[in-house]
Image (cartoon, rainbow, N blue to C red):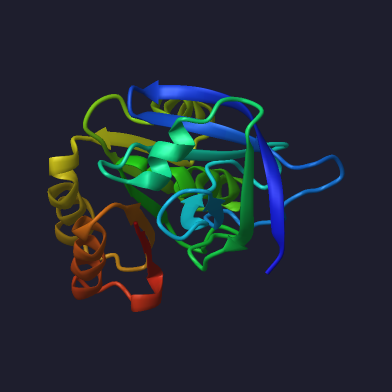
Amino acid sequence: MVEREARLVRVVEHAPDTRSLFLRLPPGERLEFRPGQFISCLLPVGEKPPLIRPYSMASTPEDEELELCLNLVPGGPGSRYLLGLTPGAAIRLTGPWGTFVLDRAPDAEAVFIADGTGIAPIRPMIRRALATAAHPVVLLHGSDGVPLYGRELTALAGSHRLLRVDHVAGARLQDEVVRRWIDADDDRSRHFWICGVGVIVRTLRDLLRRGGYERRAVQYEKW
């Protein structure tokens, strides 16, 4: 396990409790990762430091900086520590890790379903899919409030004929999935990538698999 140290170079606030942290590795170092993967941050907090917390990368492998998008978890020492950092702070990390990845678009419609901050790893996945896609690419993002990266992804859809982006309230996410991809037609060739927090992820996974989609065609990451 290779441990690295990155520097926090800037912070972007999306909402009072949600921010993006941009990290830069030392000169000459790059983190080679696949869209959808995460790093583990080794944080100097908790009863037995380091406290290890995984965070998906919202940046693409081609970006110069690593972007982590996270929100404040009530009672969560990891998120509280990270959101309290200012530019110049050092962050120890390992990785990349994870098998929730996309290297190229499938030979079928690609559907990305994000719940809240689950959009973070899906954002670079969509860009990679569009670089290789011959079939439609669809994003359904469930969010309460202003969707993360909403303007960026809507603009991307406006410039790419294969991409469709839809935002719905988080409470409507399950019903929309059933309506669009289970009840609407008999096409079961689609491939899905689902990411979010809590039981909704496994609920959507099970609905799609029981609805006739192949097990391997429904990938997911639950936080």
In the figure, is residue 88 to the left or right of 151?
right
Quadrant in the picture for residue 149: top left
Whether residue 118 is visible here, answered yes or no, is no
Whether residue 211 is visible here, answered yes or no, is yes
Q: In the rendering, at what x and y percent does residue 143 appear?
A: 25, 35
**Where 119 sits versus 36, above or below?**
above
Q: In the rendering, at what x and y percent does residue 5 appear?
A: 70, 47
**Where 10 sits versus 169, above or below?**
above
Q: In which quadrant is the N terminus drawn? A: bottom right
Picture mark count: 0
Q: In the rendering, at what x and y percent does residue 95 appear?
A: 62, 60
What residue is shown at x 27% (from left), y 44% (from top)? 75
What residue is shown at x 60% (from left), y 59% (from top)? 104
Closer-to-camera residue (166/118) = 118
What residue is shown at x 71% (from left), y 53% (from top)? 4
In the figure, is residue 197 to the left or right of 171?
right
What residue is shown at x 21% (from left), y 53% (from top)? 177
Q: In the rendering, at what x and y percent does residue 161 appear?
A: 50, 36
Closer-to-camera residue (154/4) = 4
